[in-house]
Image (cartoon, rainbow, N blue to C red):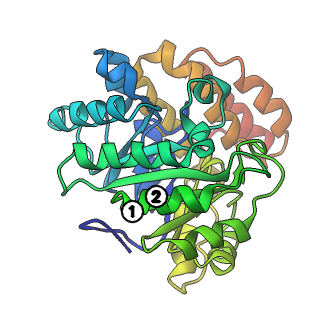
């Protein structure tokens, strides 16, 4: 599969998630086989106002995989200007492609008309896509992440997808729920399939992928060109190598042992601390650490302890307790 002039490997992309897909997680997932990664969403308006925090969100790249910066906004001219700003900063903020957020369901995003609110106005969504595409060099692909619609009465995903394709968008990632459904109940593969059938560009299916078999099943149900994994990768970067194996017709690799799981957890959080400083990193590390504890003996207690982490040393002690609770000695 190609993203513009970029050749993507067989496997799954890492879907962008606010507060989760920072540089540390992107590099880790790329190491385990993510075919491309995308930043946390960056405010186009904030970029045009010179906000340095927004620039920092975009920095760090995606390891060895192609990396995209995701922008959100509802004004075509602001989105275009933000795209131009990022292109001018590519020596400082290297990236391979730009992504437009048309899927975020958070009220603070949709309240300004951005994210999945764009699905209520397909013409505006198309204008945003065209403005960004025309603002950047042709060699930089522009992609879009969207949902199937705003609600059950507003299933505009097909029309928005067609307008995006007509505007020169190189690839779509489709989350198989409406904005009203947030993240429950299950996704609607049939609606993703309709979008895939309606456009001539690559489409990635997204939503509820927690296993390699589930990824292969979603591809079969939708006819999509690939998949993008979001929440299923939390605390489980190994999922990418498993999906790559299944899609290549190979056996699923053995799941990680306890030593690998805890070693990757340490490395993941240490990388966050190096980049953000210990205090800031450990606030976010609480959630990441909790995800790594899923499925372990005493997981509920361990996750509660994760919520109180304040230092990397405390994480080390928690890993020691977790190891002992599994019946092992200190790793």
Secondary structure, mark 1, is helix
> Which residue is rendered at x = 75% and y = 45% of the image?
183
Whether residue 18 is visible here, answered yes or no, is yes
Whether residue 27 is visible here, answered yes or no, is no
Image mark count: 2
Secondary structure, mark 2, is helix
Quadrant assignment, res 108: top right
In percent of width and height, residue 285 lies at 58, 27
Give the farthest residue toward the front: 123
In percent of width and height, residue 89 lies at 18, 32
249 in relation to 312, above or below = below
> Which residue is rendered at x = 34% and y = 57% of the image?
65
Do the residues bearing badges 1 and 2 touch, measured as CB atoms within 8 Å?
yes
Tag 2 residue? 163
> Which residue is rendered at x = 77% and y = 31% of the image?
303
Q: In this view of the protein, which residue sits in the foreground, 264 or 170?
A: 170
Tag 1 residue? 166
Q: In this view of the protein, which residue sits in the foreground, 295 or 244?
A: 244
Quadrant assignment, res 156: bottom right
Please indicate whether residue 9 sits to the left or right of residue 148 in the image: left
> Which residue is rendered at x = 32% and y = 32% of the image?
77
Please indicate whether residue 20 sits to the left or right of residue 155 in the image: left
In percent of width and height, residue 192 lies at 65, 66
51 in relation to 223, above or below = above
Screen quadrant of the C terminus: top right
Please indicate whether residue 282 sits to the left or right of residue 79 in the image: right
148 in relation to 264, above or below = below
Please indicate whether residue 83 sits to the left or right of residue 244 in the image: left
Residue neighbourhood size for the residue with mark 1, other residues' Cα within 10 Å, grouped as few (<14), some (14–19), many (≥20): some
In percent of width and height, residue 32 lies at 46, 59
């Amino acid at each position: 599969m190609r993203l513009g002039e970029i050749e993507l490997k067989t496997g799954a992309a890492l879907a962008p998630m606010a507060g989760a897909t920072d540089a540390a997680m992107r590099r880790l997932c790329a190491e385990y086989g993510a075919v491309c990664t995308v930043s946390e969403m960056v405010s186009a308006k904030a970029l045009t106002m010179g906000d340095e925090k927004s620039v920092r969100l975009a920095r760090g790249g995606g390891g060895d995989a192609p990396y995209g910066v995701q922008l959100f906004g509802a004004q075509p001219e602001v989105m275009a200007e933000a795209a131009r700003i990022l292109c001018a900063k590519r020596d400082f903020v290297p990236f391979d492609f730009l992504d437009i957020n048309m899927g975020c369901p958070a009220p603070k995003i949709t309240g300004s008309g951005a994210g999945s609110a764009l699905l209520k106005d397909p013409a505006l969504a198309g204008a945003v896509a065209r403005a960004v595409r025309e603002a950047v060099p042709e060699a930089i692909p522009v992609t879009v992440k969207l949902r199937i619609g705003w609600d059950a009465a507003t299933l505009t995903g097909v029309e928005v997808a067609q307008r995006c394709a007509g505007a020169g968008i190189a690839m779509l990632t489709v989350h198989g729920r409406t904005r009203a459904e947030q993240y429950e109940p299950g996704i609607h593969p049939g609606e993703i399939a309709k979008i895939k059938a309606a456009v001539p560009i690559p489409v990635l299916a997204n939503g509820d992928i927690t296993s390699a078999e589930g990824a292969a099943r979603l591809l079969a149900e939708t006819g999509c060109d690939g998949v993008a994994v979001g929440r299923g990768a939390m605390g489980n970067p190994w999922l990418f190598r498993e999906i790559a194996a299944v899609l290549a017709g190979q056996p699923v690799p053995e799941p990680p042992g306890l030593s690998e799981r805890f070693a990757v957890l340490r490395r993941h959080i240490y990388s966050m601390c190096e980049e953000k400083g210990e205090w800031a990193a450990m606030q976010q590390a609480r959630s990441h650490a909790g995800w790594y504890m899923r499925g372990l003996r005493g997981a509920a207690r361990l996750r509660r302890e994760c919520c109180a982490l304040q230092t990397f040393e405390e994480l080390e002690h928690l890993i020691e307790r977790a190891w002992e609770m599994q019946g092992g000695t200190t790793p």
